[in-house]
Image (cartoon, rainbow, N blue to C red):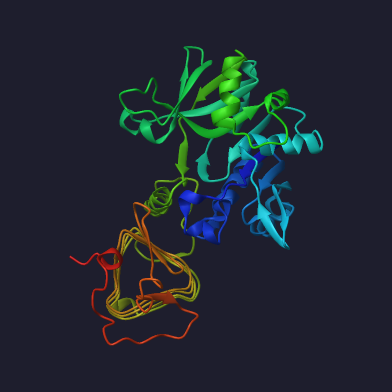
Amino acid sequence: MKAMILAAGKGTRVRPITHTIPKPLIPILQKPVMEFLVELLRQHGFKQIMVNVSHLAEEIENYFRDGQRFGVEIGYSFEGRIIDGELVGEALGSAGGLKKIQEFNPFFDDTFVVLCGDALIDLDLTEVVRQHKAKGAIATVVTKSVPKDAVSSYGVVVSDENGKILTFQEKPSVEDALSTEINTGIYVFEPEVINYIPPNQEYDIGSELFPKLVQLNLPFYAVNMDFEWVDIGKVPDYWEAIRAVLRGDVKNVQIPGKEVRPGVYTGLNVSVNWDKVDITGPVYIGAMTHIEDGAKIVGPSMIGPNCWICEGATVDNSVIFEYSRLGSGVYLQDKLVFGRYCVDKTGTAIDVQAAAIDWLITDTRQETVSHHNKGQVISNFVTNQS
């Protein structure tokens, strides 16, 4: 059985992470989100997977290679070109990428699944395909019910009593929403659906292909399923996904490492004097990270590998990526630290170098910079001191 993972987007809503990490490789406690999708596909018998790539394509290709170590076969369709010796991504949209693969050579020759590469899901794909075939559908959208007050964050699907799709609403207001079923970005298609995608142009599945299928009154259905679905479309979503995993709310994601204290997990060779730090789980601390005496960590929090947390620093309900050094007295609450950026839970970022406070948050691989004011509160954004 064949599948496609959509992995060509730039991930603009997850910046600054996606400046250097393609969205499908964003780690959920050290494991890329797309790896969970590959494992799910394999479990349900989808062994041949095409991936469209564009932004930072080589990172995805170098990680997954031909898929052999994951028990599947993976092929890549690059969307872009070389300009002045540099690879430049030119994504074709979710439907356009599908069309390019099929025009190159008719790969999709039977019922196939399409997944967005930026969500954690625990879904019975076998049952979804069964329902798709039972309805005689040309296309099926997996939907999920959400509370009425949450519909404005999603694409809403409106269907009749048999599940046939009547229309879509893109992020409607709560008052205008005609349904509480939302599009999860999980699709089942028959190969002939590709005939409705125009060639050689950017074209989207949700906003362009699906309305065309409705307009033509084709057998196009929604299958509403109750399953775990953690979207990481935006920085706040990612921050919440890490928290959910640490709390144990996501069943198919295990906290890595070894539980050394109740709710405290570590990777290899973590350097910490447990009697002289204040750590309240759930917390994950990556390999080769050093926590100085007097530091405080309050969960749910993740400290990546090769970090250094100085004396008097506090990490509260935050996500700290690898090779981050937090100086003495830094107070981080509800923050994400990635390289030179500190991001709050709404997605607002500060460049600590541009703000001249990179001695507070820096890279463990560079020489430590001393500062006579290193314990003072520099920015409420970074410290959130009360």
Residue 60 placed where, x, y %? 65, 55
Give the left or right position of residue 272, taking residue 19 as reference: left
Residue in the picture at 34% in, 60% down: 335
Give the left or right position of residue 9, taking residue 357 as reference: right
Residue in the picture at 31% in, 31% down: 149
Residue 167 placed where, x, y %? 49, 19
Give the left or right position of residue 305, taking residue 200 as reference: left
Residue 229 placed where, x, y %? 47, 39
Residue 45 visible in rendering:
no
Residue 303 visible in rendering:
yes
Q: Nearer the viewer, residue 40 or 146?
A: 146
- The C terminus lies in which quarter of the figure? bottom left
Residue 3's image quarter? top right
- The N terminus lies in which quarter of the figure? top right
Q: Residue furthest right?
A: 105
219 w.r.t. 375: above or below:
above
297 w.r.t. 150: above or below:
below
332 w.r.t. 164: above or below:
below
Residue 37 placed where, x, y %? 59, 45
Residue in the picture at 46% in, 57% down: 255
Q: Please count the marks in the image.
A: 0
Q: Residue furthest left?
A: 386
Q: Residue furthest front?
A: 84
Residue 352's image quarter? bottom left
Give the left or right position of residue 353, taking residue 332 as reference: right
